[in-house]
Image (cartoon, rainbow, N blue to C red):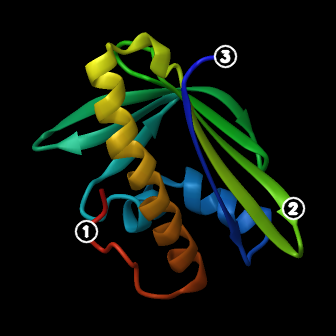
Amino acid sequence: MGRTIERSIWINAPRERVWQAVTDPAQIEKWFAPGTAFSQNGDVISIRIDDADVDIALVEVFDPPRQLTTRSLPDRLITTTYRLEDENGGTRFTVIESGLEHLTEEDFRLRMQQDSHGWELALQNLNAYIDGRPLPTPGGF
């Protein structure tokens, strides 16, 4: 089995609401990376850096409101899967980052250190955003 990072959180909202928050570029900006403009053109997700759109991911699976899977660009080595499941009147949201075995040992350690903690913070922000509370990490990641 490959190296992965997996984080999960229960959110007191229906799957459709969580799905909107994790797939609508305008909403992603609000909880994930405030001040960063996200866009999607076809299956390509981009962020705005200065005056240019930079492609960061390719959508591989789009199964509303259950699963979104993207692959990193330009290398296509890292896959990020977002799963949404009904649980206890709300939604269990899980993010799984896989393909990390393709990284050098040093890059793997850095990625694990950064993304393991980063996803925990991101999920807390997502939960607060959906709940209408202030973001615990308002500067994003």
Depth check, front residue: 112 or 130: 112
**Vertical order, 108 against 129 (above or below):** above
Q: Which of the two marks, 3 or 1, is nearer to us in this view?
A: 3
Please state, as top left, top right, bottom left or bottom right, where the N terminus lies in the image.
top right
User: To which residue does mark 3 refer?
Assistant: 1
| CA neighbours of label 2 inside 10 A, class few (<14), some (14 to 19), many (20+) | some
Tag 2 residue: 86
Name which residue type carries label 2: Asp
At label 3, the amino acid type is Met
Say which residue appears at 44% left-offset and 28% top-offset: 57
Nearest the eye: 72 or 20:
72
Which image quarter holds the C terminus?
A: bottom left
> Residue 40, located in which quarter of the rendered image?
top left
Query: Relative to residue 69, is residue 47 drawn left or right?
Result: left
- Give the residue type that dot 1 points to: Gly
Which sits earlier in the primary sequence, circle 2 or circle 3? 3
Q: Are marks 2 and 3 in contact (CB under 8 Å)?
A: no
CA–CA distance in space, label 3 to label 1: 34 Å
Left-right relation of 1 to 71: right
Badge 2 or badge 1: first in the primary sequence? 2
